[in-house]
Amino acid sequence: MNERGFTLIELLVVIAILAVLFGLTALALTNVGNDAKSAAAKAEVDMVQTAIDVYMAVNNTDTVTSGSCTKVGPNTTDFGDYLRRTSRFYFYWGANGTVTSAWEDSGCTTTQVWP
């Protein structure tokens, strides 16, 4: 008899290789969601900081109304005219115009996403 097929050892080796590849892929993708959230927060921080900077330059001032745990958008006091949409995150910024933190939760107590 000359049967063709895979032996049990060959099948076990293939399964072991696939398990290792799956494990490596899972480890590589573990923080992808957190990294994406952090990148989105950084992009919004940059957007808010730019709006504040433009407001201060156009109005020739070195202060803005400070904000604490606030979503920002077109209706925001002072620099809202320089924003197209409401932010996903909540921000703190000082009267000097510097954004200091970004939070995911509305109470700004549990999930700080930047810095």
Image: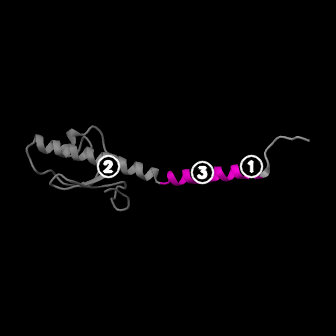
Q: CA distance from mark 2 to mark 1?
A: 47 Å
What residue did someone put label 3 on? 22
What residue did someone put label 2 on? 42
Residue range of the region highlighted in magenta in the rendering: 9-30
- Residue at (60%, 50%) from the top-left corner? 21
Residue 72 seen anywhere in this rendered image of the structure = no
Which SS class for mark 3? Answer: helix
Q: CA distance from mark 3 to mark 1?
A: 16 Å
Determine which quarter of the picture holds residue 4.
top right
In the rendered view, tell whether residue 65 sits above or below residue 79: below
Q: Name the quadrant of the N terminus.
A: top right
Provide the major secondary structure of the magenta segment.
helix
Mark sitting on residue 51:
none
Q: Nearer the viewer, mark 2 or mark 1?
A: 1
Q: Nearer the viewer, residue 70 or 61?
A: 61
Q: Nearer the viewer, residue 14 or 33?
A: 14
Which SS class for mark 1? Answer: helix
- Residue at (65%, 51%) from the top-left corner? 17
What residue did someone put label 1 on? 11
Residue 34, position in %: x, y?
43, 53
Q: Is residue 39 magenta?
A: no
Residue 10, position in %: x, y?
74, 49
Which SS class for mark 2? Answer: helix
Amino acid tagged 2: Lys
